[in-house]
Image (cartoon, grey):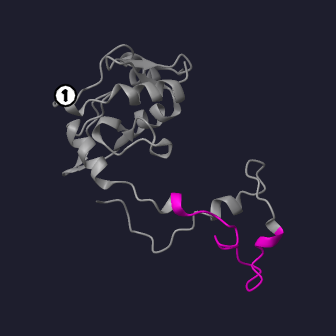
Amino acid sequence: MGRGPQRTHYYPNMPFWRLKSDGFWQLINTENCINLEKPSKEPTSKQLDFDLTEFNRQRDLKFRQLVLRAYNYQCAICGFDLRHDSIAIGLEAAHVKWKQHGGPCIVNNGLALCSLHHSAFDMGSIELDSSFKIKISSGVNGHQMVEKLFWVFEGKNILLPRVKEDYVHDRFIEWHLQEVFRQ
């Protein structure tokens, strides 16, 4: 799919260990995490007692494919549809109700968004109402480019899937509005 080489090993525990002194993370009992066999090495995930089940859970690859297809491989906000040959670039399948909060990997919980609008949607800068109109948070600010990339879409309908059964369900929009959107 053109996403770079696959890694043979993943170390999701390393950012936590490396950032332990940044004032954000708090690691408890770090004295028990010293690697006695190789003192210069960082602790293993077992030594950190780190639960890897969340990280090992694979995303449903069909979710991305089905959402992008439903939205005709274009951003539902701006219509962005860059491709390199037949591969979409910078286009993502966004969960409306986030997967880590129980959002299912179904088309009705997805939006095809360019990476910029996906980030803004996940940060609460963009929202949909129940009639699929775009709402922009009053906190969004910037100069001309922000006007062109955000404010010009305020109150306009998203680009909807051709098939009505693929529209985002109201319950997911309501969750996003209550949990993510920042007025």
| Residue drawn at 31 percent across, 60 percent down | 2
Say how many tags the image has.
1
Q: Note whether 164 is above or below 119 in the view shown.
A: above
- Left or right: 143 with respect to 23? left
Residue 33 is a magenta residue: yes
* Residue nearer the viewer, 136 or 176: 176
Q: Is residue 18 visible?
A: yes
Q: Note whether 94 is above or below 43 in the view shown.
A: above
| Residue drawn at 52 percent across, 62 percent down | 53
The residue at the far bottom in this view is 37
Q: Residue 63: x and y, percent?
A: 30, 48
The residue at the far left in this view is 162
Magenta residues span 31-54
Q: Residues within 10 Å of mark 1 (few under 14, many from 20)?
A: few
Q: Which residue is mark 1?
A: 164
| Residue drawn at 37 percent across, 16 percent down | 152
Q: Residue 50: x and y, percent?
A: 64, 64
Give the secondary structure at mark 1.
helix
Q: Amino acid at mark 1?
A: Lys
Residue 103: which quarter of the image?
A: top left
The dominant secondary structure in magenta is loop
